Amino acid sequence: MMNKGLLIVISGPSGCGKGTVLSEILKDDKFFYSISATTRNPRPGEIDGVNYHFLTKDKFEELIANDGMLEYASYCDNYYGTPRKPVEDMLNEGKHVILEIEVQGAMKIKEKCPEAKFIFILPPSLQELKRRLNKRGTESAEVIGKRLNEAVGEIEQSYKYDYALVNGELSLAVDDLLAIIRAEELNLKNSNNIINEVLKNA
Amino acid sequence: MMNKGLLIVISGPSGCGKGTVLSEILKDDKFFYSISATTRNPRPGEIDGVNYHFLTKDKFEELIANDGMLEYASYCDNYYGTPRKPVEDMLNEGKHVILEIEVQGAMKIKEKCPEAKFIFILPPSLQELKRRLNKRGTESAEVIGKRLNEAVGEIEQSYKYDYALVNGELSLAVDDLLAIIRAEELNLKNSNNIINEVLKNA
């Protein structure tokens, strides 16, 4: 019997580089990236089912009412959330589902899915995080200062996670993330039929 | 502040190849292989402090009385055990201590050191285990049959471990073992000062 996939929740402050780390591991199709749902309007270039599942407010509230959201929040009069069904379907197919989500959403997932594994991606230092945010060149000093404050608040919550890895050099961070996932595959909580496999012709 | 090393307990049936897997990872001096103590006489070529710590019965019993053994057992009128002090010294120096030990000893360690991580090395199948035992060419069919029976008994206990990995191809088994150890290094239970490191100049 195939093992179910792992539910892997990934957080990290803006500028920690988690998108780059994830795009490396998502090249392997044993992973499935969970796409969030929202009621906000698509921005130019955004595609339904790629950037977000764009839902009407009625549909979103219907999903909430039927326990169809693993977590959701409301922000600037719009809902954002994680639809339950695609996550569960992919886990049952044996895929590892990646949820990229901020700390509060992650903690809601923890309540509903205690078997999920929570991984926090850290910048090497706050100085380096500031350098990376400045390098983007798209935001004012004021916005960058706000993001740094938010980052400190998020990093202070990271002790609630199972694992933390530092994204200093990309390839090492990718290796660390893959090591965590491989170890979880080998954890007997997630793979106990391996023993029966070995013994089956005893 | 340096993190303490990890206590890693490794078991697996005779013929699973755990010695070969361990000799690969022990090339890295961040690991320390714990040497057992015994009261039996050295065999020709065996060196004190390399193959075993050869102790007198009085000395061994003194260590037992002073809680100086993490575990011990008596077999054919001789004691065998794991001295506590070198293990603790090396953990405090930040080294990962490898204990290679059979299932019953491992379970005694689990009582004294619940923070230890328990890894079981499986053969790909019992057929392959039999083939490997036959290949050694040193033992009679009767002895091999006995070892296979013992192997089944040990494998049936392996669900008590944290992790199980299959030693089919050596390099993959070594990678799996290193992935488990890396994940444990990144587990926040074992590395919580990483968060303070990142925040220290906030």
Image (cartoon, coloured by chain):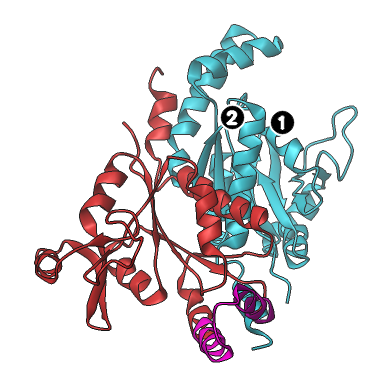
Chain colours: A cyan, B red
Work out whether residue B185 or residue B109 is closer to the camera in this orientation and state it. Answer: B109
Indicate the amino acid at tag 2: Asn
The residue under the point 51% across, 40% down is: A164
Chain letter behind tag 1:
A
Three-letter code for the amino acid on which mark 1 is drawn = Thr
What residue is rendered at 46% in x and 44% in y?
B185
- Residues at marks 1 and 2 touching, judged by CB atoms closer than 8 Å: yes
Residue A86 locus on image (x, y percent): 78, 58
- Relative to A28, is B153 on the left or the right? left
Q: Alpha-carbon neighbours of circle 1 within 10 Å: few (<14), some, or many (≥20)?
A: few
Which subunit holds the residue at mark 2?
A
Corner quadrant of residue B47: bottom left
Residue under numbered circle 2: A167
Is B199 situated left or right of A68 in this image?
Answer: left
Question: Residue A42 appears at what percent x and percent y?
Answer: 85, 34
The mark that comes first in sequence, 1 or 2, is 1
Find the distance from the CA under tag 1 to the CA under tag 2: 10 Å
Q: Tell whether B116 sits left or right of A182.
A: left
Neighbor class of circle 2 (other Cα within 10 Å; few <14, some 14-19, many 20+) is many
- The residue sitting at 23% across, 57% down in the picture is B84
Q: Percent position (x, y) of residue A104?
A: 54, 43
In this rendering, is residue B72 above or below B198? Answer: below
**Looking at the rendering, in which quadrant would you find the N terminus of chain A?**
bottom right
Q: Which residue is mark 1?
A: A20
Q: Is B72 drawn above or below residue B91 in the view shown?
A: below
